[in-house]
Image (cartoon, rainbow, N blue to C red):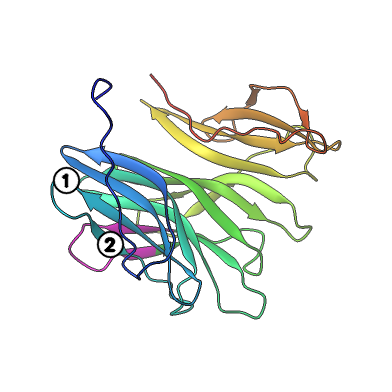
Amino acid sequence: DGSATPAWVELANPNGSYNGYVTAITRNGGNVYAGGYCYNKFGAAVAGYWVSDGSTTPAWVEFANPYTSYNDCIVSSIALYDGKVYAGGSCYTADSIPINKACYWVSDGTATPTRVELENPNGSSYSGWVNSVAVKDGVIYAGGACYNSSGVSKAGYWVSDGTATPVYTAFTNTHGSSYDSNVYSIAIDGDDIYFAGDVYSSSGAEYTGYHKNSNAAWTELATGYDTSVYWGSYPCQIVIK
């Protein structure tokens, strides 16, 4: 609460004494929802989320990978809407060269979570991933990126109402279509939706910024960093206040 010593709540790995990670967190009322993944005895990441009311042992809700029982899935973002948990992430396939399949799961905490796959518009043999999810009026927005045939990651987002096939909208990299770009965070403000991320240029420099609404102009927040010299930067989260 900013005054007392912060209390530590440990989230146990249900698979045993293996590493576990929290990648996203949110709350509703007295409950905290922490999304992430836990490694199992096969060395594979198992996606899911913990629910904690601060008094009892946090409960783990696991997400299944339809491609392999080893799992190999992660949760990268979590949102709440109308009593349900929406968790964005990705799952690897069991191919000899695994493909990362973008997706989100929906869970009400009682039934088996539902997984919705988000197709890569550049082809099913190329990877895609979700870095952020947000829900507005029952519509899910999942931001991330998809590889194309040239191995370039193209920033964009999927829109899904849970019934029809999710639709993908790609953003334009203003520094050139041959260079990587990503969406890392989504924020909603009334009728407006902000998609924060980064883009790269021909020099390898990284630029941070955001798009407002679909196909909107790119607003740059930082000048380019030469990634051969600097680590660069990207927005982990965008908040509207």
The residues bearing labels 1 and 2 have C-alpha atoms spaced at a distance of 15 Å
Depth check, front residue: 72 or 172:
72
x 43%, y 80%: residue: 69
Instruction: Classify 30 as above or below 87.
Output: above
Q: Residue furthest right?
A: 203
Residue at horizontal 47%, vertical 79%? 68
Q: Amino acid at mark 1?
A: Asp
Q: Nearer the viewer, residue 4 or 36?
A: 4
The local secondary structure at tag 2 comes to strand
x and y percent of residue 163 in the render? 35, 59
Residue visible at 34% across and 63% down? 13
Q: Quadrant of residue 63?
A: bottom left
User: If you read the primary sequence from the N terminus, does the residue marked by circle 1 or circle 2 appear first?
Assistant: 1
Does residue 36 appear to the left or right of 123 in the view shown? left
From the image, tell me which residue sits under label 2.
61
Q: Is residue 45 magenta?
A: no
The number of discs equals: 2
Q: Is residue 9 above or below residue 58?
A: above
Q: Which span is picked out in magenta?
A: 104-115
In the rendered structure, find residue 53 and report the number of the disc placed on it: 1
Residue sitting at x 85%, y 38%: 202
Task: Specify the farthest residue to the left.
Answer: 55
Coordinates of residue 157 in the picture (x, y in percent): 53, 46
Three-letter amino acid code at the position of disc 2: Val
